[in-house]
Amino acid sequence: MLFRSGLTGALCALLTAYTWVLLAHVVLSWVSLIGPAARTGPLRLVADAVDALVRPVLGPLRSMMPPLRAGGVGIDLSVIVAFVILQVVEGVLC
């Protein structure tokens, strides 16, 4: 669409911003695996804020699909499903 209404443009911007927040959640979850230093200070405040933003979306997805078992490790696929849903919605609206 070459011309988007104000509401559609704002919604597209929010979807894009949420995609970045979801990506930040993934990166921060990897950083937290580094060690205890990554769980303190300003980074912890950022991680808590990002977690609060993604929890309403990932929580229901996690309850619908359990982690994929790979040996002794559970792989959380809810983030991937959330990315796919966001991309589909952005493709339809934007």
Image (spheres, rainbow, N blue to C red):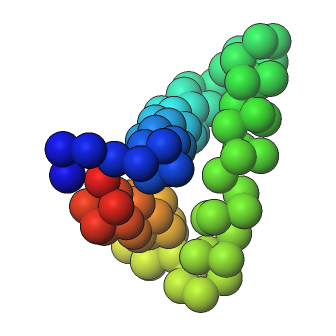
Query: Is 68 on the left or on the right of 54, as rendered?
Result: left
Total count of labels: 0
- Residue 56: image quadrant is bottom right
How far from the left and from the top, in percent, is residue 58? Answer: 62, 64
Query: Is 53 on the left or on the right of 75, as rendered?
Result: right
Residue 51 vertical placement versus 93 (above, below): above
Q: Residue at x 76, y 34 (%)?
A: 49
Q: Nearer the viewer, residue 82 or 2?
A: 2
How far from the left and from the top, in percent, is residue 20? Answer: 46, 36
Query: Is 48 on the left or on the right of 58, as rendered?
Result: right
Q: Residue at x 77, y 46 (%)?
A: 52
Q: Residue at x 70, y 17 (%)?
A: 43
Residue 55 vertical placement versus 44 (above, below): below
Q: Nearer the viewer, residue 82 or 86?
A: 86
Q: Residue at x 80, y 23 (%)?
A: 45
Kindly give the residue lying farthest to the top in the view shown: 42
